[in-house]
Image (spheres, rainbow, N blue to C red):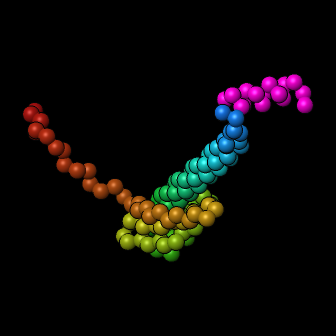
Amino acid sequence: MRHGGRAARRWIQRRYGGREPRERGLATVWVAVTTATLCTVFAVVLALGQVVVARHRAGGAADLAALAAADRALEGTTAACRAAQEVARAQGAEVVRCGVQGEIADVIARVSLGPYAPEVRSRAGPATQSPAPTGPPQSP
């Protein structure tokens, strides 16, 4: 045995009262547990990010499809919904439901991104009459 080995053994005997330390390999276990925990947290954060992205894409597609349908509302429901489907398809979405009542279009669009397929509803139509002013009346 080399001299350094004997010195280390003597130090261990003095330090631990002649018995071998029981914590051998404990750092490896802690590193493995910490690594697994960090990987799990990272995977959850990525999955949540993917959900948010899918929801926002579906919302944007639904808004644009509803605007396209409202623009063609006077041409009839078929033409309006066809325009909504074309716009949604260009956004990477699909129209789940499309309805037109008067000049108001109501569209539900779905975007599939991985295992997630959120559906978002959007309505579009002409602006209503502006609300009455609030507050004290203006004097001339």
The residue sitting at 58% across, 63% down in the picture is 116
- The quadrant of the rendering that contains the N terminus is top right
Which residue is situated farthest in the right direction here? 1
Which is nearer the eye, 119 or 4?
Answer: 4
The image shows residue 49, relative to residue 94, as above or below, that is above
Q: Is residue 1 left or right of residue 58?
A: right
Seen from the viewer's position, the closer of residues 115 and 72 is 115
Residue 4: percent from left, percent from top: 84, 25
Q: Looking at the image, which residue is at 44% across and 64% down?
A: 121
Q: Reply above or below: 1 against 41.
A: above
In this view of the protein, can residue 41 be seen by the observer?
yes
Q: Position of residue 59 (x, y in %)?
A: 49, 57
Question: Closer to the camera, 21 or 34?
Answer: 21
Quadrant assignment, res 91 = bottom right
Choose top left, top right, bottom left or bottom right for residue 7: top right
Residue appearing at x 58%, y 53% in the figure: 44
Residue nearest the observer in this picture, 117 or 12: 12
Q: Quadrant of the C terminus?
A: top left
Picture coordinates of residue 64, whole percent (x, y): 51, 57
Q: Residue furthest front?
A: 18
Depicted 15 relative to depicted 64: above or below: above
Region in magenta: 1-16
Q: Is residue 9 left or right of residue 71?
A: right
